[in-house]
Image (tube, rainbow, N blue to C red):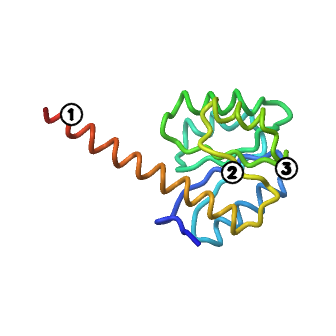
Amino acid sequence: METAPSTVEFLVADDDPRVARFLSAYLESKQHTSVSLTDGTGILSWLETNHCEVVIIDINFPKQDGISLISSIRSADQNLPIIVFTGLGYDEEKMHAALRAGANGYVSKNLPAEQLYSVLSRVLMTTRTHARRDARLTSILSAV
């Protein structure tokens, strides 16, 4: 199984407190830090004043449209990995909308925790690899 390269700071956003607590506890058992939010309307303000390396988000908040929330997060930070954590099963239209809005991927809540962690680890490693590549390119271009 793949593992994340180091300790990661996660934001878990899910309107079901049990799901948010479970996922946060699981991530902490893997030696990561995690904050969970259960109100979609507070996510953007939390991100303005706090730091995380990955957002795991349910797109079905009662007071907030998850797709527009992903768009807003993406507008605020082009590089922050956003993973949709959904209990919808595979709703192709909604998942494609989430990806168009800026999500990096999606995972079903029905997956076993170890498979979820494997997917999160892969997305994080890919994102970090792209960030290092982009930093090298910026360095090269600024030297020219």
The x and y percentages for residue 74 are 56, 32
Farthest front residue?
Answer: 92
Q: Which residue is mark 2?
A: 12
Q: CA distance from mark 3 to mark 1?
A: 46 Å
Count of numbered circles in the view: 3
The x and y percentages for residue 34 are 63, 58
Which mark is nearer the camera, 2 or 1? 1
* Mark seen at residue 9: none
Q: Residue at x 52, y 54 (%)?
A: 124
- From what the image shows, is residue 9 above or below residue 43? below
Q: Residue at x 65, y 72 (%)?
A: 29
Q: Secondary structure at mark 3?
A: loop
**Amino acid on which the number 3 mark rests in the picture:** Asp
**Amino acid on which the number 2 mark rests in the picture:** Val
Q: Which residue is mark 1?
A: 141
**Amino acid on which the number 1 mark rests in the picture:** Leu
In which quadrant is the N terminus drawn?
bottom right
- From what the image shows, is residue 2 above or below residue 35? below
Q: Are marks 3 and 1 in contact (CB under 8 Å)?
A: no
**In this image, 23 relative to 30: left or right?**
right
* Mark seen at residue 16: 3
Q: CA distance from mark 3 to mark 2?
A: 11 Å
In which quadrant is the C terminus drawn?
top left
**In this image, 97 relative to 124: left or right?**
right
Q: Residue at x 73, y 60 (%)?
A: 23
